[in-house]
Amino acid sequence: MKNILLIGGSQGIGLEIAKNLSQQHNVIVASRTTGDLADLNVKHLTFDAATDTLDLDSLPEVLDGFVYCPGSINLKPFKNLKIEHFQEDLEINYLHMVKIVQTILPRLLQSSQSSVVLFSSVAASTGMPFHSSIAGAKAAVEGFGKAIAAEFAPKIRVNTIAPSITNTPLSEKFLNSEAKMERSAERHPLKKVGQPQDIAQMAQFLLSDDSSWITGQIFHVDGGMSTLNI
């Protein structure tokens, strides 16, 4: 049984990851709300990555897995973006994550081989209009993941998942009608919008021993959007 910490696992993709892992592992979810965690066998810590410092006394001495789930979808024309928008996206997606990794690093190093899973976006590698702020923040995540994977191999594996739009509360305003859902699905080669379980299954694999020879990678779970033009 592994000790796995999820930051922001009370809804969306994080919740699906918690569901998948809670049957076999000791899962700690640190998030602002409990969301739909009540029926799961997980430990919940009330935590806001933007303002709180993670309480190490509430965590196991050894952490075998870590997932950082918080993110943002801030899509605006570049001319309408202020520097504050870029700062906010960078803080939510990258800087708060870095702070937490620094905090828990000694406990990740206590594991025989721990696994860290981060989240990027298809927009970090595929040029898309109106994505300049979020693409920049997520590109920082990808660069960080590779650098840390190199620095701490073989003790810590670090991989990043780069989804396309996924049907979660975060993306609700982009998918809140049948017409919007159909348009989004049509943009993907597989002609469907991603579901939380699609992403959660990849995260579960990367946290498992089945992926013990994989590190420093970016996994595009995006319906083919990043590589196929059909």
Image (spheres, helix red, strand yellow):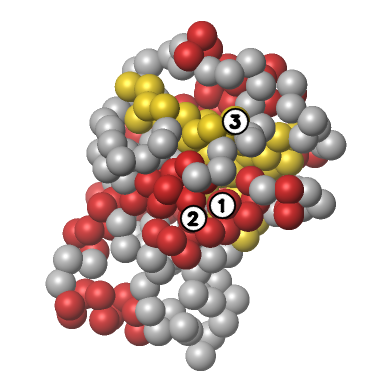
Callout 2 secondary element: helix
Q: Which residue is mark 3?
A: 3
Is residue 74 visible in the rendered image? The answer is: no
Extreme residue toward the top, this view: 57
Q: Residue at x 63, y 26 (%)?
A: 63
Give the mark toward the camera: 3 or 2: 3
For the residues labelled 2 and 1, say whether their Cβ atoms are less than 8 Å apart.
yes
Q: Which residue is mark 2?
A: 200
Q: Which residue is mark 1?
A: 203
Is residue 207 visible in the rendered image? The answer is: yes
Callout 1 secondary element: helix
Q: Position of residue 35 (x, y in %)?
A: 25, 39
Where, by quadrant of the figure, is residue 148 drawn? top right
Amino acid tagged 1: Ala
Q: Residue at x 64, y 36 (%)?
A: 1
Q: Residue at x 28, y 80 (%)?
A: 183
Which residue is more in the foreground, 52 or 129? 52
Amino acid tagged 2: Ala
For the residues labelled 1 and 3, say whether their Cβ atoms are less than 8 Å apart.
no
Tell me if residue 133 comes above or below residue 197 in the rendering: above
Q: Position of residue 169 (x, y in %)?
A: 26, 52
Extreme residue toward the right, this view: 154
- Mark with earlier residue (1, 3): 3
User: Which numbered disc covers residue 40?
Assistant: none
Dot 2: within a 10 Å radius of its alpha carbon, few (fewer than 14), some, or many (20 or more) residues? many
Q: CA distance from mark 2 to mark 1?
A: 5 Å
Q: Position of residue 187 (x, y in %)?
A: 38, 80
Which residue is more in the foreground, 104 or 36? 36
